[in-house]
DNA sequence: TAATTGTTGATTAACTCACTCATGTTTTAG
DNA sequence: CTAAAACATGAGTGAGTTAATCAACAATTA
């Protein structure tokens, strides 16, 4: 029952980019050093976040990455779904499930796991990068 | 971000045993058929639950498994921790973490993930097998 | 034009999950 | 008393995922 390193690294990278937001760009090298992330792995993550429309990048000397959107408009749930997929804590809760029990009106497993997923989503979707960088939720 | 099949099967098996509670024992074969669980895998799970003190078993012909404790005294959180380990959604939230950031007073990742874990635990630790078999929480 | 930096895709080592197999022990039916 | 039924245990395995690495390339700027 875990989130991946990919998500953790992604959040840490965005934490650095949020701190730099509005003032400067950051190179992957700097992010990697500050947050102890393997640089090649970090690159995959930054690329994924760029493709998802969260970051822009500039090539060449003096290049680097920066946030496109405002930190308060990006939720942690959004980031984790980009990097890790759906938050569903068990297969049968997801939309594309072929679990035979899910077709019954009342599958106890699905019911409980559905409420777990909702609780997780409720926290992560209402917690933005701005809250995150501030160290707590202030909204 | 998932619970294992082991936990899911374990909950399904306990669902059957809760239904039989007080009236009869169930053989692994019956549980396996009713919940579509591979029988050898189910056995590992039943053994683990027995070692944890939730079940008793009787060998030989006419043998089988049965719940020792009352369904309302067993929480889903307890079951999942037996089969899957701690509920911590990310390494740094667990007690035995060597994450360099965890030592700082305020690691944002740890803070958020801690509240996610608490939310999950709050649901699962207050939901018993009795609620589970009833199809909803009634306490 | 050479150095720096981002971009992309392929590859890989290690690990975990979900089983499976082989073998043994206990109990009861007949 | 013997054979079948059932639980007990540990080792092994194939598929898939994770986390990371490598190689080669493209764009920018000093």
Image (tube, coloured by chain):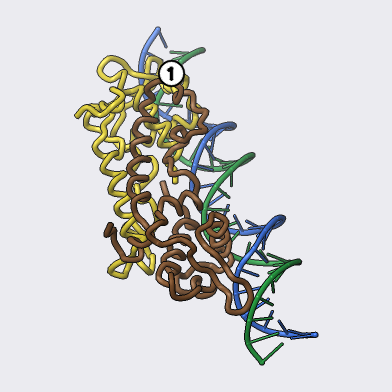
Chain colours: A yellow, B brown, C green, D blue
Q: Secondary structure at mark 1?
A: helix
> Could you tell whether B25 is left or right of A26 in the image?
right
Residue at 55% x, 72% y: name it: B64
Residue at 47% x, 70% y: name it: B36
**B29 w.r.t. B10: above or below:** below
User: Splitting the image into 4 quarters, where does residue B129 fall?
Assistant: bottom left
Residue B90 on image: x %, y %: 44, 37
In the rendered image, which residue does mark 1 sit on?
A: A30
In front of the other: B20 or A70: B20
In front of the other: B103 or A51: B103
Q: How many marks?
A: 1
Residue A121 on image: x %, y %: 29, 44
Could you tell me which chain the residue with mark 1 belongs to?
A
Residue at 42% x, 33% y: name it: A8
Q: Residues within 10 Å of mark 1 (few under 14, many from 20)?
A: some
User: Splitting the image into 4 quarters, where does residue A9 fall?
Assistant: top left
Residue A136 on image: x %, y %: 28, 27
> Could you tell whether A23 is left or right of B13 in the image?
left
Residue B92 on image: x %, y %: 46, 32
> Could you tell whether B94 is left or right of B127 in the image?
right
The answer to whether any part of residue B68 appears in the image is yes
The answer to whether any part of residue A58 appears in the image is no
């Amino acid at each position: 029952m875990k989130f991946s390193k990919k998500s953790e690294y992604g959040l840490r990278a965005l934490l650095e980019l949020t701190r730099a937001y509005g003032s400067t760009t950051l190179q992957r090298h700097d992010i990697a050093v500050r947050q102890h992330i393997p640089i090649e792995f970090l690159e995959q993550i930054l690329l994924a976040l760029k493709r998802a429309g969260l970051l822009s990048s500039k090539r060449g000397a003096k290049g680097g990455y920066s946030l496109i959107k405002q930190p308060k408009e990006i939720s942690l749930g959004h980031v984790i779904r980009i990097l890790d997929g759906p938050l569903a804590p068990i297969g049968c809760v997801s939309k594309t499930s072929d679990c035979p029990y899910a077709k019954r009106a009342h599958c106890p497993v699905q019911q409980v796991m559905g409420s777990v997923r909702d609780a997780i989503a409720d926290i992560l979707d209402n917690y933005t990068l701005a809250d995150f960088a501030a160290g707590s939720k202030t909204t």
